[in-house]
Image (spheres, grey):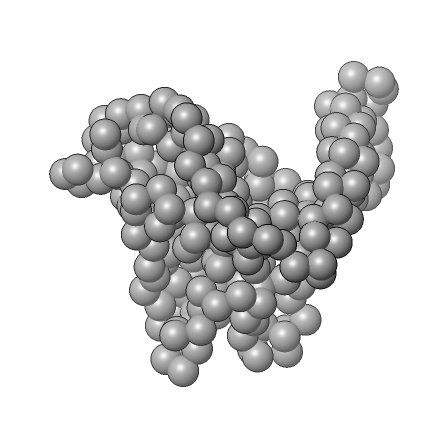
Amino acid sequence: MSISKKSSPSKITETTSVIAHQLKTPLSGIKSSLEVLLSEDLGSLTRQQREYLELTLASTEKMIFLVKNLLDAARIDEKRLQLNVSNADLVDIVKGVVEDFLTLARAKNSTIVFKVVGEIPFLTIDAIKIQQVINNILYNAIRYNKGKGLITVILKHEGKFIKFSCQDSGIGISDTEKKKVFSKFYRSPRVVELATEGSGLGLFIAKAIIEQSGGKIWFESNEGEGSTFYFTLPVT
């Protein structure tokens, strides 16, 4: 099943899409090779070798997320965001994302906890796009978290919806910034001062995907006390 919106893409957006597509395959190859090396299937590693490989893997994962975001942002601008929906296990999707981020979380000295509250049925969703939403939310939680921080991810069945939440113990969001959080390319001045990397696309993309999926996305935050991001998806 396919849901799409179409219009003529701008030249800049088209160029961005082409470049992002060309980067996708080599980056995936690099990631796979690093994972094989870290598995020690080809030989044991010293502590220093493992540390260097884990840092390289974390940097490669950042690039992969950036490429995915550029592609999705281009599609949203062109009003041709497409959802290929099927029955999917949201618990497995979230669990997979959490596992993918463990290396980056360790590099940032953070701990991720994943909890499931109640029975979570299969949902009719675009599993890849929802995975991207969770990627973007969790990536932000790790980047903006404080040292020795805790990130708690929860899935909960609430009536006709499944609610996802991701709570961090990071820098939080000021009242003046809250209206801009889901804007394209928006990055907090405090984040820039901290020299934290990012494109400002993740939450812009997440909002478009969740709303087109029939859900809602929002957050609660106090400056200096961390943030909690939520989204819901309908149970069909």
Residue furthest top in the image: 41
Q: Quadrant of residue 16?
A: bottom right
* Residue at (48, 58) in percent of width and height: 203
Is 140 or 71 nearer to us in this picture? 71
92 relative to 163, above or below: above
| 58 and 50: which is toward the camera | 58
Q: In the picture provided, is 117 more to the left or to the right than 91? A: left
Q: Farthest residue in the left direction?
A: 159
Which residue is painted at 78% across and 43% down in the image? Answer: 23
**What residue sits 73% from the left and 23% below the top?**
39
Q: Quadrant of the N terminus?
A: top left
Picture coordinates of residue 28, whole percent (x, y):
74, 33
Q: How many marks?
A: 0
Residue 198 placement (x, y as % from top left): 63, 62
Q: Is residue 142 visible?
A: no
Q: Residue 33 or 127: which is nearer the viewer? A: 127
Would you say residue 214 is visible in this rendering? yes
Task: Name the residue at the bottom extreme.
Answer: 176
Q: Quadrant of the C terminus?
A: top left
**Percent x, y of residue 63:** 71, 48
**Position of residue 80 measured from the top left corner of the image (x, y, whole percent):** 52, 47
Quarter occupied by residue 21: top right
Q: Is residue 38 above or below residue 158?
A: above
Left or right: where 143 falls relative to 207: right
Tell me: 151 left or right of 67.
left
Q: Nearer the viewer, residue 204 or 188?
A: 204
For the point 62% across and 54% down, which residue is it?
A: 9
